[in-house]
Image (spheres, grey):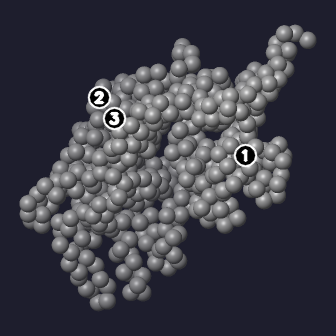
Amino acid sequence: MNLFLQQLINGLAWGGIYALIAIGYTMVYGVMQLINFAHGDVFMVGAFVGLVIAQLLPDKTSPLSVFLVFLSAMFFSTLLGILIERLGYRSLWRKNAPRLSLLIVAVAISLLLENSGLLLFGAAPRSFPEIIPSKSYFVGSIIFTNLQLIIILSCLLLMGILHLIVMHTKMGRAMRAVAEDSEMSALLGVPRERVLSFTFALGSALAGIAGVMVALYAPQINPLMGLLPGLKAFIAAVLGGIGSIPGAMVGGFVLGEAETLVSAYLSSSYRDLLAFLVLILVLLLRPQGLLGKGVVEKL
Amino acid sequence: MNWKKLLLLAIPLFLWLINYPISNPRLFNPYALQIIILMGVNAILALSWDLVAGVTGQFSIGHAGFMAIGAYSSAFLTLNYHFPFLPAILFATLLSAAAGFVVGIPTLRLRGDYLAIATLGFGEIVRVAILNAKSLGAATGLKGIPILSSFFSVYLALAIALWLCLALLKSQPGRILLAIREDELAAQMMGIDVVKYKVFAFSLSACLAGIGGALYAHWTSFIHPDSFTFMKSIEIILMGVVGGMGTIYGAAAGGMIITLLPEGLRLLLEQNPVLSQNKEFIRMLFFASLLLIFILLRPQGIFGKKEGV
């Protein structure tokens, strides 16, 4: 029982991280029906911006520098997200180009970011400075670290903020309108292109933060680190029901927990296979995901 | 017999006649021959992808998986059981077609984006399976495959593939594939069994990719799971996009161009020690930029016609 609880706590941190990335996938899918394959690489860029800033700062462990590391990672990944949308997707989206073209652009941008990273930083993993000195706490026989606690709590906090933005701001309402019916919202005067930019910015900011979190938790980073978590977060989004923000949160946590339990009770080599298995099962059995609405294709 | 049919017969004869001088290292530069052969193989692969993506409008990012199946199955037969080349290729073709069929049935009910992820998963599964299969050389790869491909066999295969695709586009099934690309829902409304035809396109495409893989394996004589990664699939996509999706000659030409271009790049890079260290990354950057430039500025590719929608 204790082992089980211990694994649940370990899984929560990964779950939160997956959820943060998955939200970006699901929001973009909601407003433009595109799987933004480059999203995992935005997450990688966040981690590397964090690395560069952390190495520049003199006093690495002060709360201010921790804050600065997160803030700069968030800032630059937001910028990158907006840039990707502007330069990559917008012209195609305006032309109403086939979705195949959008997907190819997504793959190309992802390759561009990965190989630029490889060129700049090399393929060897880099260790991330310990900007939050780790402490362990015991509750009974269960151990958890301050880092796990920080990750879980900040994930919950960020999701709360996101919920407020999406449900209670003008931009959030516009986002929901575009996701509901893109054409109609444009007719009613919703500035769709600004909504797209905003959606990419929001998703990328979360991915950037998730990047630093993984960098602290892992604690090694390399330019290809976005591939697998990106794919898994996408699977989490599908599991929760793509297009649904609460779905992405639930999907992220479920996948994180499932992975940790599988590697604890079966074998850690099954860990990466599990996500793909989940994907196939969801697509076959419940394609709309856990919380998604069953959509009938419109004529 | 009209002149067109005569021309058709003349092509194999022509290929066979120039095969001897071109394969002789004293008469023809072997490095140039190497590139010419790879151009032919890649043209077949580009055609194969074009059949699924350009003609049928389904996105596959796992074509390296079909290629790997063709390469490994044919090499396994010629290496261990001393099969002649033709039966080995035929077997490889059938096996990859079967793989296309098996992948097709569950995944082709998926819409575009999900299909992309599923094909990506398929490509990775094939690669990891080979990586763990001892009889296929696992992580050391298969060495000493007899060199059975030649200029003649590669370009004859390409000619047959071209003819097959052109004939397909003129036939009823080909028209149905185009209809699915243009509007899947409308095609369904017209009474077309969309899933059936998508599976058909996938199997045919897998066939071609398998032939490409078999020819490749019997030319390089060494294959390794690393030759069939996700990056290879991207390379195949790039060929199709640059040539022009949905065009038959265009896609084949795209395959040749994308084989030729990096060779020039390589000569350029190898002179500079810093750049040559990172040449793999630079090559991928070059590919990715090219892909982006084409999709954004000339989505119809070099040889495609602009669509008047």
For residue A259, side relative to residue A153 (left or right): right
Q: Which residue is mark 1?
A: B147
Q: What amino acid is labelled 2 in the image?
A: Pro
Q: Which residue is mark 2?
A: A191
Q: Indicate the secondary structure of the residue bearing disc 1.
A: loop
Q: Residue at x 31, y 31 (%)?
A: A86
On screen, residue B91 above or below A3: above
Q: Which residue is mark 3?
A: A85
Q: Residue at x 57, y 19 (%)?
A: B304
On screen, residue B153 above or below A119: above
Residue B102 on image: x %, y %: 71, 50
* Chain containing mark 2: A
Quarter that holds the C terminus of chain A: top right
Camera-side residue of A284 and B206: B206
Q: Which of pointers 3 and 2 lies earlier in the amino acid sequence?
A: 3
Q: Indicate the secondary structure of the residue bearing disc 3.
A: helix
Would you call the spot at circle 2 few (<14 residues within 10 Å), some (14-19), or many (20 or more)? Answer: some
The alpha-carbon separation of the residues under discs 1 and 2 comes to 61 Å
